[in-house]
Image (cartoon, rainbow, N blue to C red):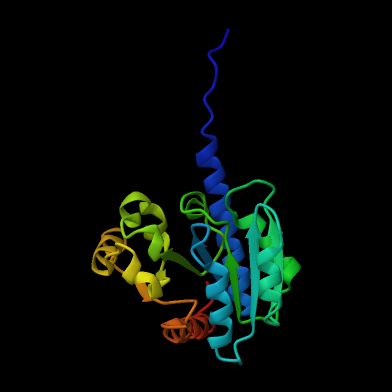
Amino acid sequence: MDPYRVIEVKQSVFADNNKDADALRRELKAQGTFLVNLMSSPGSGKTTTLTKLLAALPPEIKTGIMEADIDSDVDAGTIAATGTRVIQLHTGGMCHLDADMTRQGVRQLGTEDLDLVILENVGNLVCPAEFDTGAALNMMILSVPEGHDKPLKYPLIFQVCDAMIINKIDVLPYFDFDMEKVEQYARMRNPNIRIFPISAKTGEGVQALAHWLAEQTRGWKEKEPL
């Protein structure tokens, strides 16, 4: 009897996904749509941050939102109330989105006339960071109640993200959260990461984040094709 074979499934899955992600990025670049992948833990304030961000973005930047969850449409309902084009993606139990799932969402949302699309990924600091969605930019939210040690405990998400939003700074006096340490730890993982302290509740810091994201969107449209 021949010895059994060992198949490196995970490597194959990632390789195929990366090809799909690169193809989706090229397609979105060709139509001038900037896709942002937003990741964080559950309860960090992703949807609340998005509602404040949508209000702060320049009105000429046409924006759409894709909400991803294992179930429910609570977040899509919140975004829809702002008047923004939105769809809800159900992952069927999956703890992340990959490039093919993202492509399905892009098709259903209809992105040809949009400058900026933000994908609110499933709440999780592990799985979403492993899969390239085809986004041009990765952002994450770390909220003050989660603690400043998360870059040490969940390194990959900090490594793959271009920007870290530190949310809920309005409750800093009530938590043992060290802003200097979290910035130090995050830059240990990614020296180039941009850091934006904000309060989605009060709106503090949101305008600076919106200004930067608008610049990134305009810059993407002006870049040479991929």
The answer to whether residue 139 of the structure is visible from this angle is yes
Compared to residue 116, the image places residue 47 above or below, namely above
Q: Residue at x 42, y 57 (%)?
A: 157
The number of discs equals: 0
Q: Which residue is drawn at 40% across and 75% down?
A: 170
- The image quadrant of residue 90 is bottom right
The answer to whether residue 111 of the structure is visible from this angle is no
Q: Which residue is drawn at 47% across and 54% down?
A: 129
Compared to residue 129, the image places residue 107 above or below, namely below
Which residue is more in the foreground, 55 or 27?
55
Residue 224 at x, y = what percent? Answer: 50, 79
Which residue is more in the foreground, 67 or 22?
67
Identity of the residue furthest to the front in this view: 174
Residue 100 at x, y = what percent? Answer: 65, 55
Identity of the residue furthest to the top in this view: 1
Quarter of the figure with the N terminus: top right
- The image quadrant of residue 83 is bottom right
Residue 34 at x, y = what percent? Answer: 56, 76
User: Could you tell whether 125 is left or right of 68 in the image?
Assistant: left
Q: Which residue is drawn at 33% across and 56% down?
A: 151
User: Could you tell whether 189 is left or right of 135 in the image?
Assistant: left
Which residue is more in the foreground, 161 or 8?
161
